[in-house]
Amino acid sequence: MKKIVFLSAVLAFSSCKKEVSENTDSKTETYSEGESAKAKTPEDLGKELFEGRGNCTACHLPDQKVIGPSIKEIAKIYKDKNADIVTFLKGNADPIVDPSQFSVMQTNFGITKAMSDEELKAIETYIYSHLK
Ligand code: HEC
């Protein structure tokens, strides 16, 4: 009988412990989104490049057209047409979102062509994250 009590106590304890560690896990995730120094996901890196070095936010906002189409619109059209953002940003594909304004976008290829494949992929991931 004693054994059973002991066992259930252990079980209760370990299930408790699991819950606690799960909670901490989700907390760390929430925190890491706002920090840039820790292990970055491609989406974080993409956001950083989009807002920082790329200066893309000057013309592209998440869901509102300013000078350029919104990020959501770009994501939607690229997904629908199964097109490749990375190829476009390397200057190797025709515009499909708003070809009449392409010359404005073209001025940025100097920046995007200097980015690595990994960085361009990260920007693509960031753009697609707006479809969620
Ligand atoms: C000076 C304003 C401006 C800046 C800065 C800018 N864009 Fe654009 N972008 C535009 C305009 C205008 C269009 C619409 C023309 C077009 O579709 O090519 C566009 C279109 C796009 C498209 C859709 C292309 C297509 O197939 O039609 C992508 C993808 C894009 N931009 C990504 C970026 C990224 C990434 C950056 C940052 C490195 C950036 N843009 C910076 C103005 C800008």
Image (tube, rainbow, N blue to C red):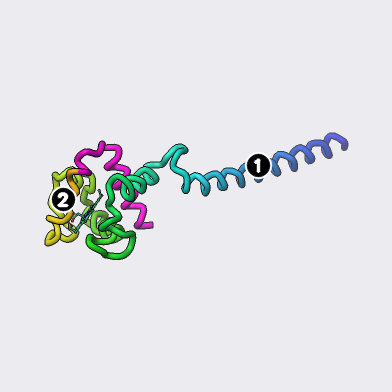
Q: Which residue is mark 2?
A: 107
Mark 1 residue's CB less than 8 Å from ligand 1: no
Residue 131, percent across and down?
Answer: 35, 57
Front residue (pair 24, 4):
24
Q: CA distance from mark 2 to mark 1?
A: 53 Å
Q: Looking at the image, is 5 positioned above or below residue 129? A: above
Q: Which residue is mark 1?
A: 18
Q: Amino acid at mark 2?
A: Thr
Considering every residue shown, the one lying at the far right of the view is 1
Whether residue 86 sits left or right of residue 36 in the image: it is left
Q: Amino acid at mark 1?
A: Lys
Mark 2 residue's CB less than 8 Å from ligand 1: yes
- Residue 24 in which image quadrant: top right
Residue 124, percent across and down?
Answer: 29, 47
Q: Main secondary structure of the magenta part?
A: helix
- Residue 28 in which image quadrant: top right
For label 2, the crowd category at 10 Å Cα-Cα, with few meaning under 14, some 14 to 19 and many 20 or more, is few
**Residue depicted at x 79% and y 37%:** 7
Q: Looking at the image, is 12 positioned above or below residue 68? A: above
Residue 13 colored magenta? no
Whether residue 77 sits left or right of residue 125 in the image: it is left
Residue 30, percent across and down?
Answer: 52, 49
**Residue depicted at x 22% and y 62%:** 67
Looking at the figure, which quarter contains the C terminus?
bottom left
For label 1, the crowd category at 10 Å Cα-Cα, with few meaning under 14, some 14 to 19 and many 20 or more, is few
**Residue depicted at x 15% and y 51%:** 106
**Residue depicted at x 23% and y 52%:** 82
Whether residue 126 sits left or right of residue 39 in the image: it is left
Magenta region: 111-132
Which label lies toward us, 2 or 1? 2
